[in-house]
Amino acid sequence: MAEEKPQSWWQTAPGLLTAAAGTITALAGLVATLHNAGCFRTANSDTVRPAPPGAAVSPAAALNVPIAPTPVRDAPDATPSIFLRYTGDPYGCVLSLQVRVGKTMAIPTSNLFEVHGIKPGATSYVVGGSIGCTNLGTCIASGQGRVTIRDGGIYDIIWRPLGGTRCGVELKEAPTP
């Protein structure tokens, strides 16, 4: 009787599934690490990052004095706009959020991000997405509330950890200088 040669684990279904799962897990970890390291951002990204300890910080930045932007208008009949701003945090976090104010949806891609077409007055907002921090990991971000919209107003994006992998986000009108 001929002796059967044992199959290699690579040739068994469980072995193939284990190898595929290990490869996918390794690739997902690599992509997450590269994302947190900033490899997927464009060179002109204006994302605010906190200054490293001991670095020189301008007096305006140290006092968190808002800089009043000059609204850009394409035409005299341009729709009202607001500015979304993230003033940073000590954790080196990057915000990937979708913000809906009233009926207008925005995905901020820079700091002091201009959003057009928002009706002035009291309105509701909803924020969702994720926040990735170099030292803290990533949390699922969400929040909702009401703000009073003023044409040309600056609205700070403020977040806080809620525990586990969740964090809360709110919009708050910045004080007028």
Image: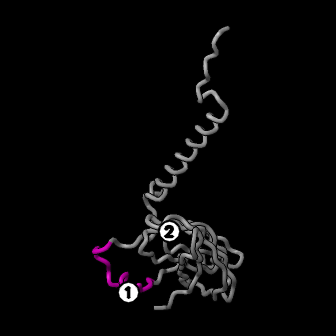
User: Judging from the image, what secondary structure is the residue with disc 1 in?
Assistant: loop
Q: Position of residue 29 (x, y in %)?
A: 51, 51
Q: Position of residue 138 (x, y in %)?
A: 53, 64
Q: Nearer the viewer, mark 2 or mark 1?
A: 1
**Residue matched to label 2:** 110
Q: Position of residue 121 (x, y in %)?
A: 67, 89
Image-quadrant location for residue 166: bottom right
Q: Residues within 10 Å of mark 2 (few under 14, many from 20)?
A: some
Image-quadrant location for residue 97: bottom right
Residue visible at 43% across and 66% down in the picture: 135
Give the residue at the far right of this rendering: 103
> In this image, 119 relative to 57: left or right?
right
Magenta span: predominant SS is loop
Residue visible at 57% across and 70% down in the picture: 164
Check the picture and name the quadrant holding the C terminus: bottom left
Give the magenta-colored segment's residue range: 53-67
**Residue matched to label 1:** 63
Pointer 2 or 1: first along the chain = 1
- The three-letter code of the residue at mark 2 reads Ser
